[in-house]
Each structure stands twice: as C-alpha cells, then as structure tokens.
Image: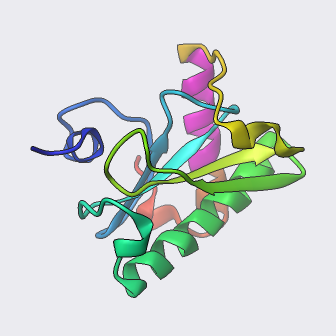
Amino acid sequence: MATVFTRIINGELPGRFVYRDDTVAAFLSIGPVAWGHTLVVPIEEVDQWVDADPALWAHLTEVSQLIGRAMVRVTGASRAGFLVAGFEVPHLHLHVFGADDMGGYTLRAIDVSEAEMDRAEAALRAALRELGAGENVPA
C-alpha cells in the first residue's frame, strides 16, 4: 500500500508543493511547527533515512539546504531548522522550518489558516525561483 506521502506526490491527495524534480518533492506540512514548515520527501518510498541510497540522501539534503535558504529569506527567522523524525509516516521525510530557538524541534503543530498556508506556499516558491531553482518550482 502506498504511503500518504506517495499519494500526495502522485496527486491522489492534495499538497502544497514548493519544489519537485525527478527524485525529490517538497511540500508544506499539514501539521506545521512554524509558518512555512516544509517536508522534503524522496519520490521513491524509503522508510528510514539510514536505508536511503547515499546519492539520494545527498540530494535530499541538498534540496533541504535550498529550501532552508528560502525559508530564512521569507520568514526572517535566524536559522533554518532541519529534523529527521519519521515516526508519523513510514516514508523518509526531512522537516525544514524557520527557527529562532529550539522550540520548533518539539514538532508541536501550530494553527495556521488556509490563507496563511497559501501565502507561505507562494512566498517559498518565489524565494526558490530567486535562488535559481525555478525549473523545479511548480507554476
């Protein structure tokens, strides 16, 4: 059975995508710990990060860095938080979020309106285009 992330990636469930290439997709978390919280997910179903092919892992972290740069740009946060947890969905995913302290690392969801989710999606897409990733940013 496909994971919920595979179903999002395949368009069976809605997702707010900010990045996609042949091996990685990035979309906003439905349980954000901060405004713009994004999940970077391999298209291939890999359960745990330690099971990922090293080349895939390298690409996931490269895309996460790019998302992190965009995150700092649009949120004004002092840092981009990065976390691998993986208990919620058995499909490798990297959490990227703006952070000014360790508070976001608890992964406690905050309430973000649909309008704010739309604004975060648009802002991250614009920042990613400015950072040169336009070919991988959905229209």
Residue at the image position 46 percent from the left and 55 percent from the top: 137
Secondary structure of the magenta portion, mostly?
Answer: helix
Instruction: Judge left or right: residue 8 versus residue 97.
Output: left
* Residue closest to the eye, 6 or 66: 6
Please identify the residue farthest to the left as the structure is shown. 1
Whether residue 53 is in magenta: the answer is: no
Residue at the image position 28 percent from the left and 60 percent from the top: 43
Residue at the image position 47 percent from the left and 70 percent from the top: 60
Q: Position of residue 67 (x, y in %)?
A: 61, 58
Q: Quadrant of residue 2?
A: top left
* Residue closest to the eye, 120 or 95: 95
Number of labels in the image equals 0
Quarter of the image with the N terminus in it: top left
Residue at the image position 64 percent from the left and 68 percent from the top: 65
Whether residue 118 is in magenta: the answer is: yes
Instruction: Judge left or right: residue 59 versus residue 81.
Output: left
Q: Position of residue 29 (x, y in %)?
A: 50, 35
Q: Is residue 74 above or below residue 80?
A: above
Q: Position of residue 13 (x, y in %)?
A: 24, 30
Q: Quadrant of residue 23?
A: bottom left
* Residue closest to the eye, 130 or 85: 85
Q: Position of residue 124 (x, y in %)?
A: 62, 46
The boundaries of the magenta stretch are: 115-125
